[in-house]
Every structure is written in C-alpha cells, then in structure tokens.
Image (cartoon, helix red, strand yellow):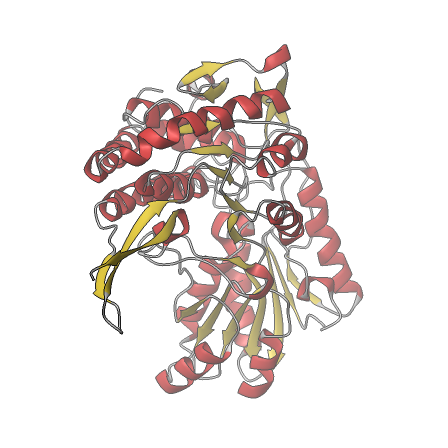
Amino acid sequence: MTGTTAETVTPHREADVVAQAPKQLFIDGQWVDARGGRTLDVVDPSTGEVLCAVADASEEDGWDALKAAERAQADLAALPPRKRSDILMRTFELIHERIDDLALLMTLEMGKPLAEAKGEVAYAAEFFRHFAEEATRIDGGYQTAPAGGSRFLVTRQPVGPSILITPWNFPLAMGARKIGPAIAAGCTSVTKPAAQTPLSMLALGEILSEAGAPAGSVNILATSTSGKVMEPLIRSGIARKLSFTGSTSVGRKLLEQCADRVLRTSMELGGNAAFVVFEDADLDKAVDGAMLAKMRNSGEACTAANRIFVHRSVIEEFGRRLTERMSELTVGRGVDDGVKVGPMIDANQRDKVDELVQDAISGGARVLTGAEALDGGGFFYRPTVLTDVPESARMRDEEIFGPVAALTPFDSEEEVVAAVNSTEYGLVNYVYTESLRRGLRVAESVESGMVGLNQGVVSNPAAPFGGVKESGLGREGGPTGIDEFLETKLIGIAMD
C-alpha cells in the first residue's frame, strides 16, 4: 500500500485502497495463495456488501506457516537487539507514512468512524516504537550464592515460536500489541487475524516485510476455519507460546489445548467493566468519561463500560446529560463526514445487542433514548441509554458489545463495590469522585487488572494491559509486555 494524504473519501478511493491491500497468505516472507485456492469474503458492515475475497488458509497452510517460524527462530533470536529494534522503528515510521490508507482500510472492513480508525493506527504504531526501545533493555543478573562457592548468572532468552490470535474490534492495534514484543524478544510468530477483519493485519505484514523482518519471522494467516487450522499448531510441540485476545469462552478452550504441551499463555479475555459515579463527582467530567468508556469503537470493546452505577442523588441529572450527548451522535458509514457511530460488525452482533436491550426493558428498565436497530443495508444500532436496569437483566452479566449505556442507582460505597465485584470478569473498572481518599480506596477494592480514576480510557502502549479472574492471564504493553515472550535461565557457575 502506498502513502496518501487526507482527502474526501470517494467510492473510487475506497475501491483503490481495497485493491492495493494484500489478499494472500504471508508465509516465510512470501505472499502465497491458500492450498486448494480457498477464499473467504470480507464484508463491509456498513453496507452488508462484499469488499473483496482473501486467501482462506487450510490446515496445511497453517503447518507451512508454523514450520517457517520454526526454521527462522534461531536466526531471529541471534539477531542483535539493536537490529530487532531497528525493524520495529522502521515499522513505526512506515505505519505513519501510510496512516490514511490504513485507517480507511480499517473503516471499510470493520466499520468504525474514520477519525477513530486513524487514532487506532497511530495507537498501533506506538507499540512498535515502545517495543523498539524495550528490545535493547532485555537484562539479566549476576550474584554470589548465599552460601558462597558458586555464582548465579541469570539470562533472558526468547520463548520461541509463538501463535498470536487477534480479534476483529481492533484489527491493527491488537496485532501490533503482540507482534511488537515478539520481535523485540526474538520470537518468531504465526498470527491469525479474525476472519471478519483480515485486511488490516495483512497490510501490517506487508509493512513488516518492507521494514526488514526476516523471512519466516512473521507469518499471517486468514482462515474461516480457525479451530481446525490453529488447534493442531497449538498441540504440535513446535509452538511454545500462545497469545490470544477474544472471548472468555474461546479462551477456556484454548487453555485446554495449551495444557497438552504446557504452552506459555497470555490472554486478554472478556470484560464486564463497571463505571461508578459518586455523588461528589464532577458530572461534566463524568459524562465525558462515560462517553469515552462506553462509546469508544461504538461500544465494541472489552474495556467498554458495561454497567454504569450512579449514586441515587445524581442519577437523574447524570442520565439527562448522558442522554443528551448520546442522542446527538450521528450514526452512519464511518467514511461519511460527521459520523460518530459506525455499524456493528455483523447482523449477529447487532441482534445480540437488541436482545440484551429488550431483556432489560422487559425486566423494568426505562428507555431514555434509542433501543432500536436501524433500517438499511448495514448493521446499525441506535445509541441507547437505559436507566433503572435491574440486577436480573442479562446485560448485568453479559458483555453488551454495542452502543448501549445501562444505568443503575446505588446508595453506598460498600453496596457499589460489592456490585462491581459480583462478576467473574475483572478487566477494567472506572471510578469518578472528587475525593482522592475514596478514589484510591475504591480502586484498591475493586477486582480488576486496571482502574480508570476520573478518566474514561486506560489503554496506553507504555502501560501494562490485562485483567484478573476470568478476564485473562498475563499483561500486554508496558515494561512487562516483553516478559511474556522471554524465558529466564539460570546458569550456575562453580567457583571452587
């Protein structure tokens, strides 16, 4: 793909960006068709129409990719850290050079508004810059044994060939968050993007190759039969690491497969984030934060505010302000001017959102705005605010993954902390209060890997990202992100 400047998006421009995108499998540094010539369709969720077809990997293609990663592992591990760093920095630069094309491609295959897609591309690029810096900081240690007589030399080595599985909602950033530290640590990889959104990841493969990633160090497979293609690779004994972002239900199955060969795993799974607004909160800031935490990616995010708890004394005013903001959002194709909310990824996701909304309404929730799917060729749902959502509502336990804000009143700190923790998930929670003591007290009490204290976004390439309980294992990003791809080795040295 070539770099372009920002311009009005015309049908010709859309077609040109799709035409330029790679559509084959990227294996051992080469672009190849799937064995048997299988293809899968990529659909524009804003129209329901097919954008293009891409190669659909078979089990044999999966083995080709993993064996290429195995062959390349020793050479990548031996590559000096500075050279691995240079590859990542060049990738960062190339992504920025092509940011307009990459953002448009993402909008077309995933649906998010163009400005938001551009933000994701920049966010993805930051992972390569961050891990370019971390690549040269891999350290170890040296010490005298406590009883004397020997020395301990501690080194860090790459885990080995890694399988990386990414979701459809952040099709470029999630791949960057995995491939960046893998290369920095010296691990080769096989990446499987979601079947709905393979184009962004294939475009990244092209950039990585141009940036100097050695043949076989990065392999990318799109497939419509994920389980059949990936399970044999996980159980192969060749792969030594699995990094997965997706649903908890799929994560459980993958953990079972990993147990067969005791693979290292890092998993960012489902979320059920709570957004808590205390009576002393700055409501302007709280509403701004709720809009960020709820409507980023049209609500299709594991970090999205799923349960919004508002103190009873301010819930009416908070609900009024939030409803006003949500009602003003323009829904439409992400390439159109002024659009703030794009489509759901597909009809199944749109229908699930509506099912959860109707369930809450039948249980007594009141509709302040929205609560309906929109007519047309795409998969759109009107931004929705519900209040008095009962504890029995399914959306209190299930991820909404859509533009629906569900408000529930509370009366005390103890009550709301118990409600926040009454879930098997623990990815992120948000707390709004002007009391620093209460803010820290609640942040320490809620069971989650991350907390946004008076802020609606916590993700940052320089900070560790991950959850507790059934929201995942390990951390991505930050100084700990590279540790997921490194083994610690002790060399004991006799001195007597």
Residue situated in front as seen by the camera: 303 or 246:
246
Estimate the x, y position of residue 478 in percent, counting from the top left: 33, 55
Residue situated in front as seen by the camera: 392 or 5:
392
Residue under the image location 52 percent in, 53 percent down: 268
* Residue 150 found in image quarter: bottom left
- Extreme residue toward the front, this view: 496
Estimate the x, y position of residue 8 in percent, counting from the top left: 37, 27
In the image, residue 243 above or below residue 390: above
On-image quarter of the C terminus: bottom left
Q: In this view, does 324 lie to the left or right of 59?
A: left
Q: In this view, does 469 lie to the left or right of 157?
A: right
Q: Is residue 490 left or right of residue 446?
A: left
Instruction: Please say whether residue 305 is visible from this viewpoint.
Output: yes
Estimate the x, y position of residue 218 in percent, counting from the top left: 41, 29
Estimate the x, y position of residue 469 in percent, counting from the top left: 58, 66
Residue situated in front as seen by the camera: 271 or 304:
271
On-image quarter of the N terminus: top left
Count up the numbered dots.
0
Instruction: Please say whether residue 412 is visible from this viewpoint.
Output: no
